[in-house]
Image: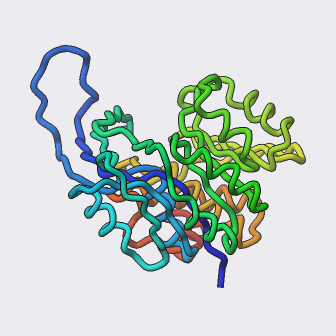
Amino acid sequence: MNKPILIIGGVSVDTVIQLDALPQPVPQTIWPKESYRTLGSTGAGKALNLSALGLPVILHSLLGRDQEAGLARSALSVPGIELLVETTDAPTEQHVNLMDPHGGRVSIFIQPPAEPATVDWAPVCAAMESCELVVVNILGYARPALALARSAGKPVWTDLHDYDGHNPHHQPFIGAASVIFLSSDNLADYRGFMEKMIDQGKELVVCTHGAQGATLLNREGVWLEQAALPVDRVRDTNGAGDAFFSGFLSGYLAGESLPTCLKLGAACGALCVTSRSLAAQNLSLQRLYDHLQAGGW
């Protein structure tokens, strides 16, 4: 049996509002195409995708004493996910995501992530003893997990999302990680940043570019490019980056080549955007391989 992947942080309840176009900053009344509440955030997205791909997951998160916490617990009650929850007095994290038909998003944090004065890290330390690696997401409360993982001798993977190359909030995560994922949304010189990270001793860096695919650089200097895979219809791009991360990681842990890992990431991301959920209901590792062989959904 595979060792579990320990994920620290990132569970929210989101209201997704699909629009014909993102609103201009003027007073107006908007009629959405559709809207719905759903599980959100990066830890939940990775956990749901990885578990669907057959990898056991332990997910640590902060949840409040509210209805949203119950919704999150219910949505994460799936085979393959063990949920470690620290209950906080602060409300459960909540977002409103305005979406356009091309996947553009404006995310409004109506309840920001909790940052309690203290967190009981004992359950996390116990989970680290038997985990394969630790994914530490860029939440403020998760920073102590970086040192805990390194003390336990576990590789740290992190996802910087739309990092701009300067934000000091990300620096502890960059410093501790052996593998870094990020998007190029706010980083024009993404290749320069990737090269800098490799010079600092990272194992590999993967940068996603939305519909323009993804690129990878490893410590041997290998540069790889992966095109995004076409889909018939984009329904919801929320979670696509976490799906890509999960598809890549599933291949990596199976010993696949880096080009194959990128293909699995692209396939998992493509399947995600055809669904309203963070992970497509019919996701499986075999389906990703079948897609890569057939060349289409």
x%, y% of residue 121? 56, 59
x%, y% of residue 3? 66, 76
- Where on the picture, by quarter, is residue 166? top right
x%, y% of residue 258? 75, 58
- Where on the picture, by quarter, is residue 266? bottom right
- Where on the picture, by quarter, is residue 168? top right
In the image, residue 218 above or below residue 275: above
In this view, the residue in front, 266 or 24, is 24
Residue at horizontal 58%, vertical 31%?
169
Taking the view exactly as shown, the residue that stands out farthest to the top is 26
x%, y% of residue 159? 59, 45
Residue at horizontal 61%, vertical 56%?
135
Taking the view exactly as shown, the residue that stands out farthest to the right is 220
Residue at horizontal 33%, vertical 56%?
39
In the image, is 58 to the left or to the right of 78? right
Residue at horizontal 55%, vertical 42%?
138
**Residue 219 in sight here:** yes
In the image, is 34 to the left or to the right of 148? left
In the image, residue 190 above or below residue 18: above
Taking the view exactly as shown, the residue that stands out farthest to the front is 118
In this view, the residue in front, 125 or 4, is 125
Number of numbered discs on residues: 0
**Residue 100 in sight here:** no
In the image, is 126 to the left or to the right of 43? right
Quadrant in which the N terminus appears? bottom right
In the image, is 78 to the left or to the right of 130? left
